[in-house]
Amino acid sequence: MIRRVAAGLGVALTATLLVSCAATASPDSSPVSPAASAPPAPAQTPSTQPDAVVGTVVRLTSDRTTVDVTVGEDSPAVRDFLSMLPLSLAFEDLSGREKIADLPRELNIEGSPGSDPEDGDLIYFTPWGNLGFYYDAEGIEYSDATLHIGTYNATADQLALLEGSPVTIEIVE
């Protein structure tokens, strides 16, 4: 019986010493905060509710004009575009039909439907990876490579004021 009590005391003393040593930081180690060992928080993802994307207003501002685009589509490409904002782009004219700007990277287009662009559409053209403001879409038909982002209400003259200076693109809150 004495051996069992002594053995039990020895085990308890050893466990106490181990816990005490583990809790004491050595001079060359730094204490670890509970937050440092906690798993990272999950990344924020856009809401899956369509109305969280559709109706979003994106503002394009140059030193000479502002053009607002109302998002009319909830697709992977539109969500990816919105996730890139704010950003700054340079627009130029293409063939007297649209104002275009290259995005810094391609958008995720998987599952995004094509469109039949019309005047007043902001689109993403997948082969070139650019945004385009159509202002003369006559004769341009449906294409899987032309993804609709939203619509705008601006004249060709207003769109021309986007050229020649950086254009800031951001979501209007």
Image (cartoon, rainbow, N blue to C red):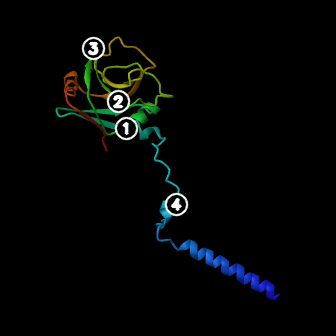
Cα distance in 3D space between marks 2 and 1 = 9 Å
Helix, strand or loop at disc 2? loop
Which residue is depicted at the point 26% across and 26% down? 91
2 or 1: tag closer to the N-terminus:
1
Which residue is denoted by mark 4 in the rendering? Answer: 37
Which residue is depicted at the point 33% across and 33% down? 70
Residue 156 at x, y percent in the picture = 22, 21
Q: Which mark, residue 103?
A: 2
Other-residue count near label 1 (Cα within 10 Å), few / some / many at <14 / 14–19 / ≥20: some
In-front residue for pair 30/102: 30
Q: Amino acid at mark 1?
A: Met
Hey, which residue is sitting farthest left in the picture? Answer: 64
Q: Is residue 107 visible?
A: yes
Which residue is denoted by mark 3 in the rendering? Answer: 95
Other-residue count near label 3 (Cα within 10 Å), few / some / many at <14 / 14–19 / ≥20: few
Q: Amino acid at mark 3?
A: Ser
Cα distance in 3D space between marks 4 and 1 = 30 Å
| Tag 2–tag 1 contact (CB < 8 Å) | yes
Vertical placement of 72 versus 22: above or below?
A: above
4 or 1: tag closer to the N-terminus:
4
Q: Nearer the viewer, mark 3 or mark 2?
A: 2
4 or 2: tag closer to the N-terminus:
4
Q: Nearer the viewer, mark 4 or mark 1?
A: 4
